[in-house]
Image (cartoon, rainbow, N blue to C red):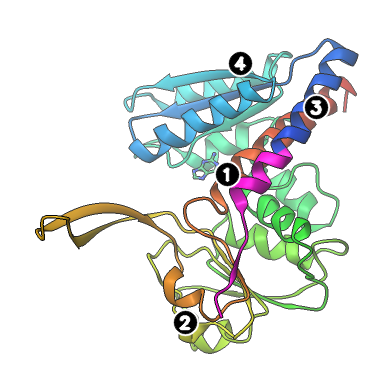
Amino acid sequence: MSAQILDGKGTAQAIRAEIKEDVDRFVAETNVQPTLAVILVGEDPASQVYVRNKESACVKAGMRSLMYRLPATTSNDELVKLVEKLNRDETVHGVLVQLPLPKGLDEKRILDLIDPRKDVDAFHPENVGLISQGRPRFLPCTPYGIQQLLIRYKIETAGKRVVVIGRSDIVGKPMALLMLQKGLGGDATVTVCHSRTTNLPEIAREADILIAAIGKAEFVTADMVKPGAVVVDVGMNRVEREIVNENGETEIVSKLVGDVAFDEVKEVASWITPVPGGVGPLTVTMLLNNTLKGARLQVQGR
Ligand code: GUN
């Protein structure tokens, strides 16, 4: 039997409509318009698409978006000055530096400089520490979106075996922390697998909920999935595929695929996220949520 689809796109639309209502109410009450500043350095094509999506989602939700597009030749000092300026600016409630930064720029130094109260990515050590202690200020956008998706589909996590494949600071590690927290969408028994894990397929097969965030196209195959498991695919990999077109000629086309071999895994799983239309739209949605939260925190003077 084929798995049911976890519709990230539809869920993201529903959450965005709720956020827009909250933003409208917040603006009416405070006369403050939640504002996100996004810094993009260089010309990375994928980053340009992500940043454009963030900007348009902000505006649609009734927030203000400030875009800073800087050349790849920007120096560390120039970037530091811009982040410091945005930290001081009381009309800015969220500051996001799009990753990856071009070579030569000191990613850690720049990210650590963002005011933790404006750190809508939740990358700052203070915010990571608060999450780890179970008293979060901001939650990182992709793991937070995945947790919301599971909650809204009433997929039980308490007592379940969750396996996360990937140990990145952006997804794998914070995802594991969120599933481990006490309360709704948490209380799971969590294992994190990575490139040095031995017997990874065996461990993956024990998962009730399998979250693939390893950045390798179609890495998770059907034999790595327990029948009836819930499979969440965080991957966005561009691959070139040979297809036969309508004239019978072979063509190379570029295609977006996840970290999960969707066609075969959907025959084993009970629920599965598609790529595209799964986790991606939720990430931007939780960024909107965090920007509104940043505005609330600053209005409350905390
Ligand atoms: N690049 C890819 N994902 C992300 C993200 O979640 N935040 C930032 N700042 N950059 C990214």
Q: Which residues are magenta?
A: 1-15
Question: Which one is earlier in the sequence, the residue at label 2 or at label 3?
Answer: 3
Instruction: For label 4, count other residues whose C-alpha is less than 10 Å away and answer few (under 14), some (14-19) or many (20+).
Output: few
Q: Secondary structure at mark 1?
A: helix
Q: CA distance from mark 2 to mark 1?
A: 25 Å
Which amino acid type corresponds to the residue marked 1 in the rendered image? Pro
Which amino acid type corresponds to the residue marked 4 in the rendered image? Lys
Residue at 65% of width from left, 43% of height from top?
12
- The residue pinned by badge 3 equals 21
Question: Which one is earlier in the sequence, the residue at label 4 or at label 2?
Answer: 4
- The residue pinned by badge 1 equals 281
- The residue pinned by badge 2 equals 222
Q: Position of residue 98 (x, y in %)?
A: 49, 35
Instruction: For label 3, count other residues whose C-alpha is less than 10 Å away and answer few (under 14), some (14-19) or many (20+).
Output: few
Question: Which one is earlier in the sequence, the residue at label 1 or at label 4?
Answer: 4
Residue 85: image tag: 4
Q: Secondary structure at mark 2?
A: helix
